[in-house]
Image (tube, rainbow, N blue to C red):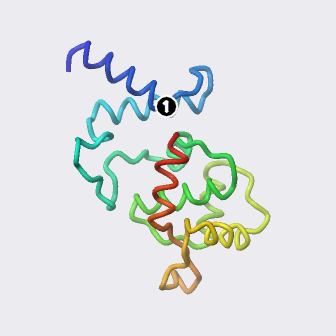
Amino acid sequence: MDSKEIQNKIQQAKELVGGTPEDPFTRIAFGEVFRLLIQESFIPAAGEVKPKTKAAALPSQVSEFLAQKNIKTHIDRVVAILDYYRRSGEEPMTIAELEDAYSSIRMKQPRNFSDLLAQCIRKGHVVEAKNKKDGKKAWQITDTGERYVEEELGR
């Protein structure tokens, strides 16, 4: 890859990430997006469909994935966390696993995960999994939720 191609990838990463360079989350997101663009696994070719299986270009930590998203509410965060774990092949998730995810990103947990999940279900982003996980109820993201993360939170 020559310097002109690298400059094009830098510009493309800046456009995809947006934000201000001073913001630490923007810097993290830019670095990750740039790395993915260099690997040429981030943007599918025209007409190519991204697989719904484990993504090769998935950030190594949920916090990096969330930093790339425009998250404003706990609902957005829960849906994005479920999407990250779906892409990692670790779906569905229990409330305890969601609590662990919140702890790993050092974010204050919502007061009531059950109510929050009910709101996500009403919006069509999440459904209760058919099978229990370790004897507990579990939830997974819907196709609508996946589109929401990509289209709305990806801005």
SS state under label 1: helix
Q: Residue at x 41, y 27 (%)?
A: 13
Task: Say whether residue 73 is left or right of residue 111.
Answer: left
The quarter in which the N terminus is drawn is top left
Q: Quadrant of residue 37?
A: top left
Amino acid type of the residue that numbered disc 1 sits on in the rendered structure: Val
Front-most of residues 85 and 117: 117
Q: Residue at x 27, y 35 (%)?
A: 39
Give the vertical position of 45 relative to 1 (above or below). below
Q: Residue at x 47, y 29 (%)?
A: 30
Q: Where residue 5 appears, x then y in whole percent?
A: 25, 19
Give the vertical position of 39 relative to 111 (above or below). above
Task: Say whether residue 33 is left or right of residue 103.
Answer: left
Task: Say whether residue 151 is left or right of residue 6.
Answer: right
Q: Residue at x 73, y 71 (%)?
A: 115
Give the vertical position of 132 relative to 37 (above or below). below
Q: Which residue does the numbered mark 1 point to in the structure image?
A: 17
Q: Where residue 75 appears, x then y in whole percent?
A: 66, 58
The residue at the far left in this view is 1
The residue at the far top in this view is 3
The residue at the far right in this view is 111
Give the vertical position of 6 relative to 59 (above or below). above
Task: Say whether residue 108 is left or right of residue 77.
Answer: right
Count of numbered badges drawn on the protein: 1
Q: Where residue 66 appears, x then y in whole percent?
A: 55, 46
Q: Where residue 74 appears, x then y in whole percent?
A: 69, 56
Q: Quadrant of residue 35?
A: top left
Q: Residues within 10 Å of mark 1 (few under 14, many from 20)?
A: many
